[in-house]
Structures are given as structure tokens and as C-alpha cells.
Amino acid sequence: MKQLKVLIMVSDATIRGHSVTTMLQAGIAAEGCGTPLELFNQLSADRFDAVVLDICELGEIGYALLSRLRASPALGIVVIGATLGVESRLRCLQSGADICLPDPLDCRELACVLLALARRLPGRAARVAEEPEIAPEGAGRWELRDQSWTLVSPAGIAISLSANERLVVRTLLDVTGRAVGRAELNQQLETDSNTGRTGGARSIDVIVSRLRRKAELAGVILPIRTVYGSGYLFADR
């Protein structure tokens, strides 16, 4: 499964920026826009798996927008907004939305909803069928796929990774069964051109905690063990 790609349309730049940042931290490739015109311009220029829309300020135009987007059955549609009462949510669903999330919105919930929705999108399933993966030697173990952006459990459950999570998991998997110290992991993050500098050992702990939480939400236990006085190890093998 390739990295999930999402377009977020929210008129408020601060909320939009926070939402995009949270999605990126969850391993979801996210971009933002502020108006329906920008939305369609970006949809025509690039391929997205899902859109997140705040249509509360659009009135009837918002429902028409949902109907137009629904013309693409492979596109996931999530509606958010501060004024989404029951009647508004029902009408959004009738107009083409897959899911409605009223305020107060927790962006972590939005990320989980998008990842769950992605597993059921017909377009995503078709692309997976078009791009079959060759089972590597040692299949049945935890492994990284999609240029290391996805961690897959022995049962086939996929967990999307952020840039920092990707690097930590890759480092631990390279030496499965051997503990890697926090200082070494932090040095890997600092020298990786895609992640930039981090805040030290505490940042490593936060990254591992987030990884474990993602795995729990996906219904699996991540075999990253804490080695007290040393660091972490991946106990898959």
C-alpha cells in the first residue's frame, strides 16, 4: 500500500496548517487549500486518495460540492466543521460524504479515520492489485514496504509511518534483536536530511510511544522493547 495522500480544505489558515502538520506526523501525505476553486485546481493537478472538507461557511454550495466530488467513487470524502448538527451531517452523508466529524475535532481521530477509510477505498484496492508485491524471504515477519513508509505486521496489518518513525523502525529492523541506544537513534535522526534535528533522547521516547499507540489503534502489539539503561530493540526474530 502506498502512502495515503489527502487534500484538506479549510478556510482558516491556522486550523488548516495544524491539520496538515498532524496528518504528516501520522505518516499521511497531506496538503491544504482554502477554497473550492483551489480544491479542484489541486485535484486536477495531482492524485489524492481522500479529501477533508470544512463546508460550514459554504451553505448550499457545500452540499453541491460534495455531490460533485462523489462523482469520483474512488475518492474518500470526510466532512468536518463547527456547526455540523445532526441534520447537517445527515445531509452531508446523503450528498456524498463518507464520514462526518463534528467539533471539537481531534486531529488524531481524523488521522485514524482516514487510515481506516483508505483500507476500503476502491481506488486504493485497485492500485494495490495493479502493483503486486513480491513476498520477500522470511515472509510472515514484520517488514517495511513502500520505500519504508509502511510497516506491515506478520498478519498483514499496515501502519503508515512518519519520517522520524520510518527512520527509527528501519534502524531497529536492520539489527533486529540487538538493542540500539537512544543516543545512536538520535544521531541517526540528526544526520538524516529528511528529518532535521530532534530534541534528544526524550524525542526518541516520544516517537516510540507514538509508534506503539499507532499499533494499538491498528489492533496489533508492536515488538519494540525497551532495554533499560540502553535503548530499544525490535524483537521480531
Image (cartoon, rainbow, N blue to C red):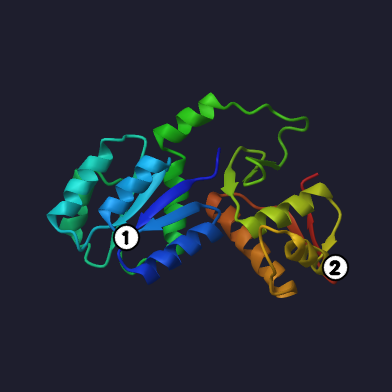
Q: Nearer the viewer, residue 84 or 130?
A: 130
Q: Nearer the viewer, residue 57 or 231?
A: 57
Quadrant of the frame with the N terminus? top right
**Image quadrant of residue 187?**
bottom right
What's the residue at 40%, 51% (across, down)?
7
In this rendering, is residue 171 above or below 232? above
Left or right? Give the position of 106 relative to 162: left
Instruction: Give x and y (percent) for residue 82.
Output: 26, 67
What's the residue at 71%, 53% (across, down)?
169
Instruction: Give x and y (percent) for residue 130.
Output: 52, 25
Label 1 secondary element: loop
Closest to the camera, between mark 1 and mark 2, is 1
Q: Nearer the viewer, residue 42 or 91?
A: 42
Which mark, by number, is residue 34? 1
Label 2 secondary element: loop
Instruction: Give x and y (percent) for residue 183.
Output: 82, 69
Quadrant of the frame with the C terminus? top right
Q: Is residue 235 visible?
A: no
Left or right? Give the position of 7 relative to 185: left
Instruction: Give x and y (percent) for residue 57.
Output: 20, 63
- Residue holding disc 2: 230
